[in-house]
Image (cartoon, grey):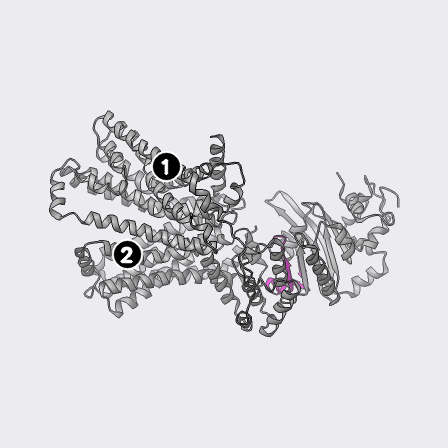
Amino acid sequence: MQAGSCADGCNKEGKNRGFAFFCCELSPELLNLHNHNNPRSNELAVEEHVMIELIRVSKTYNGAVKAVDELTLTVPAGEIVGFLGPNGAGKTTTLKMITGILNADAGDIRVNGINLAERPLEAKKEIGYIPDNPDVFLRLKGLEYLRFMADMYQVPADLRKQRIADYAEKFELGNVLGNKIMSYSHGMRQKVVLIGALLHDPEVWILDEPLTGLDPKSSFLLKSILRERAQQGKTVFFSTHVLDVAEKLCDRVAIIHKGKLLFNGSIAEMREHFKANESLEKMFLEMTDDE
Amino acid sequence: MNKYVSLIRTLLINSYTPLASGKASRFKVLALLALVVISLIPWITMVVMLISKLYAPMAAIGQEGVILGLGCALSSLMIFFFGIFYVINVFYFAQDIDLLLPLPLKPWHIMGAKFAVTLLFEYLTQLLILAPLLITYGVMSQAGVNYYFLAAVVFLMLPIVPLVLAALLAMMLMSLLPIARNKDAFRIWAGSLGLFLALGFNFILQKSFGKMKPEEIIALLQSGKNSMVQLVTRLFPGIHWGVAALLQKGALAGWGYAVLFMLLAVVILTALLLLGNRFYFRGAMGGSESQGAKRGVNTTDMEKLKTSQSPFRALFLKEWLVLIRTPAYFMNCVLVNFMWPLIFLFAVLSGSSDQLTQLRAFLGENTPVELFILLALGVGLLTGGMNGTSATGLSREGAQFYFSKTLPADYRVQINAKMAIAFALSFCGFVALVVALAWMLKLGFVPVAVALAGASLGNMLAAQTGMLFDIHFPKLVWDNEYKAVKQSWSLILNMLVCSGLGIGTILLAIHYREMGWTLVLLLTSALIAANAVLHRILQTSAPRWLGRIEV
């Protein structure tokens, strides 16, 4: 591939290869663009069930700062999708719009086919959300918090007990669930929030920087749970700064920069556009370095 | 010293609560300001009118200084009473302590800076009562410019002594904090004990005041020359110097007393800082929640999981647990409701038997039932307004408010749970008050039942107005829980509006008591209608309003 030109034949000039990706991504019809010469991707577009769908979604803060700019993105079912981007790229804003925390200024968001703006409660029931800051309801005891979450998501009585017991054992929280969350360490708080978001067995699991603050053992456990969920046909969509994790764990990555989608495809597809065996970190830096 | 000044500046900037977030329209901010000013007018008018009416008869017997004496004494008492809560909140509950302790600051720097910030807030409170009193007195007595300068000194010095005393009491209680295993529970108990001590202090003062024989009081009155001032200003040391400074005709003598008053303030403040240097850290350092013994869950806990609750019930329970476990919320949202029956009990117990007889004549077996209903409507509004639970319902969630938006529970259900807990707390407080009244005044079943019904309407309205204000002016950005309940515009606004309405209702009930059932019908209909309209507004518009709040 020539520097300054796009692999798809687009011959617009750019400062670097990153810009070459960027110029293609701008046109909405080319979303999931780097899949369009990939037979599997075409299949996906036709056959696979889309779990998260953002159509030309925009969000501006205080009428001045455009955090997300006409973002169109689809996340298929049964995949782990990493959402990457530098600080302030619009990752958290996007996740917050999908979960209903922020209202989109324009565009449509659908979760499992349900329009978030039209049927917010049903859409929220499809989601399990883990925020980047796990300091939630600190004065509740661990078990009280989990019971609260089970009630909110109306988890059947016979299932909640079993699920809480199973996850508490998995995450080794069983011996502190009688304590207030306030007395937990950061990692323990994260784990209890994780369990809370899993109790209703959501179709979509959205995690904002989930690995921050977890010890290696819990981190490993979380990764295996992410994989397990994808194998069960559930969708995992998470933001991360840890490129290594994204590279090893994700079926596909979406890269956002300055509110615009730069790339949405598999790591292998990304590599096709760069030199073989180049590290994701390097590709990422090139892609987002447009200053 | 530079560190001290810098710390005060930082704490002040941090305490500043903007009227509304950046997104709020200018109209909204102006509307809020207008509402605050409008709801303040009745208060200030009441103070001005009271003093204007009192001045002539008091001046005729040479006792006009009693007005100043009583004003200063009551102002000091209020500052001391609420100061205990305030100091415990600011000095010990504030989580900025964890950030300040590692800095190279001396204990007096932190304590002094926090004291200065608290004092500034007390001046704001004094503006409501003491400032109109001092100005009206000056106008009535045709005082010269010197009086107003001295009045400014008194205004500035007056809250120092009661606030220092409140701080000392708080420091004594909190120095026991490090030995407490459950810090939050200890703070809650210490806060409640602080309330009892403040009431007890008031009780002792009133008892000693009441020890004077009637003939002694008459002799004092007859002697003129403001001889009664000494009697009313002995509540706190130094008040009589402040009042004496204002009463002196000669400028020099006035300033002499003013200097004495200032010296006393300096001495007592220095004493506090010296003691603080020694004892403050003991309590403050024990403030952080420590990890106690690990507690797993037993079979009973797990059995509870077998029953599922509705989202409303789950939200109600969550609110309740957070309210009773968070010291700042417990003091300002739970305990405050049970203060009224206690104050009433203490007031009656510390008063003479004549006062009780008078009260029984006013509210007793022979009092018409309709008066109970009318008073209950007003008291329900008043106590409901003082209860900050609903008016801080969203504010208490702070930056975590976003989490509620992710829950698949209708926003209506979420606010209804918050209003329900607010109503339940106000109503329980009123039940306690009515039980105390029924016991003291030997009331029958009917007056108690109608009072409860009347108060429920007032409580309900206060819960709804509180939620309405908090939806529009939530304070979601705070670093200490106490700020959510102490520096919330919605709470101040709800307090002013509901107490204004409550006092208005009580005054109407007393002035037009001969209208009897007609007035009951009018006022209950008005309250029912207001409740219904607000309910409709909240149920239809709250989801849209809440959806717009973004943190």
User: Which residue is disc 1 drawn over?
Assistant: B271
Q: The disc labelled 1 sits on which kind of residue?
A: Ala
| Other residues around mark 2 within 10 Å, as few (<14) / some (14–19) / many (≥20) | some
Tag 1 subunit: B
Q: The disc labelled 2 sits on which kind of residue?
A: Phe
Tag 2 subunit: B
Considering depth in this image, is B522 or B167 the residue closer to the camera?
B167
Rendered position, B317 above or below B479 = below
Considering depth in this image, is B77 or A63 the residue closer to the camera?
B77
State the residue at coordinates (13%, 37%): B224
Specify whether residue B163 is painted magenta. no
**Nearest to viewer (mark 2 / mark 1):** 1
Rendered position, B132 above or below A140 = above
- Mark 2 vs 1: CB contact within 8 A: no
Left or right: residue B190 versus residue A194 is: left
Left or right: residue A291 versus residue A65 is: right
Q: Position of residue B120 (x, y in %)?
A: 40, 38
Q: Is residue B384 visible to the viewer in this orientation of the structure?
A: no
State the residue at coordinates (83%, 41%): A13
Specify whether residue A126 is painted magenta. yes
Magenta residues span A108-133
Numbered badge on residue B344: 2
Quadrant of the image occupied by residue B46: top left
Q: Position of residue B187 (x, y in %)?
A: 43, 53
Quadrant of the image occupied by residue A197: bottom right
Considering depth in this image, is B344 or B151 the residue closer to the camera?
B344
Q: CA distance from mark 2 to mark 1?
A: 34 Å
